Image (cartoon, rainbow, N blue to C red):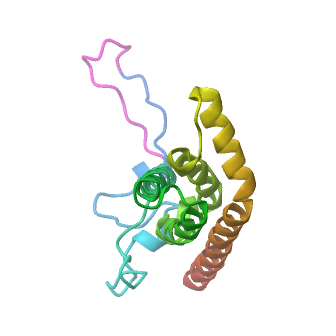
Amino acid sequence: MEQHRTRPPNDGRRRGAPLAPLPPQARRPVGDNRRAPGADAESHPARDGRPATSGPAAGLRLTALGGGLFCAALMFLLGYLDHLLFGGSLTLYGVLFLPVCVLTALWVRGGDLLTAPVVVPIAFAVGLLPVADGSGGVLGRLMGLVTGLATQAGWLYGGTLVAGVIVLVRRVLLVRATRRRRA
């Protein structure tokens, strides 16, 4: 049964004009804690009160933007530390990229899973800025960045593949849990 609300008499509009109908989630009674369709099932507790996930990162879930910022900031920091401590070792930078890919793919929330394999290559390029050998101004730095991306493509593809596999496994598990809950 659709309820129509009327405008308050002092809002400057015609008295008694009906408002637009409310969306389904707004029509729920107060205190009804059902989730809206498409809500992230991993971040809500299970029916028995336990968290839906377990492990050290059970409560940590990043949005798509948060995952991208986390990954880019961490790779920039690691690239800067690599430059300071090891003189910009591209192999070390590539090795450090792999755990960042794993963490990003594990910590992004269920609704934003497909963004993890997209943000990790961008973060690789951002973190490569302090590591890339570039002298001679902006063009020299840009040439060093392009060279670093070309020579370290194996690490870039490997990290992106690792993130993609983790995301696919998490997505399959999420879909199965949703189907089991509906059945």
Q: Is residue 132 left or right of residue 53?
A: right
Q: Nearer the viewer, residue 135 or 46?
A: 135
Q: Is residue 58 above or below residue 74?
A: below
x, y (%) of residue 83?
Answer: 46, 53
Q: Is residue 33 above or below residue 27?
A: below
Q: Is residue 92 left or right of residue 149?
A: left
Residue most extreme to the left: 10
Q: Visible in this render: residue 33? A: yes
Q: Nearer the viewer, residue 33 or 114?
A: 114
Q: Across the whole image, how many numbered discs are drawn on residues?
A: 0
Is 5 one of the magenta-colored residues? yes
Q: Which residues are magenta?
A: 2-15
x, y (%) of residue 94?
Answer: 60, 65
Q: Nearer the viewer, residue 34 or 44?
A: 44
The residue at 24%/16% (across/down) is 10
Q: Is residue 12 left or right of residue 143?
A: left
Is 29 one of the magenta-colored residues? no
Q: Visible in this render: residue 1? A: no
The residue at 62%/69% (across/down) is 163
Q: Quadrant of the C terminus?
A: bottom right
Q: Main secondary structure of the magenta part?
A: loop
The residue at 34%/72% (across/down) is 59
x, y (%) of residue 68?
Answer: 51, 52
x, y (%) of residue 128?
Answer: 57, 50
Q: Is residue 18 left or right of residue 64?
A: left
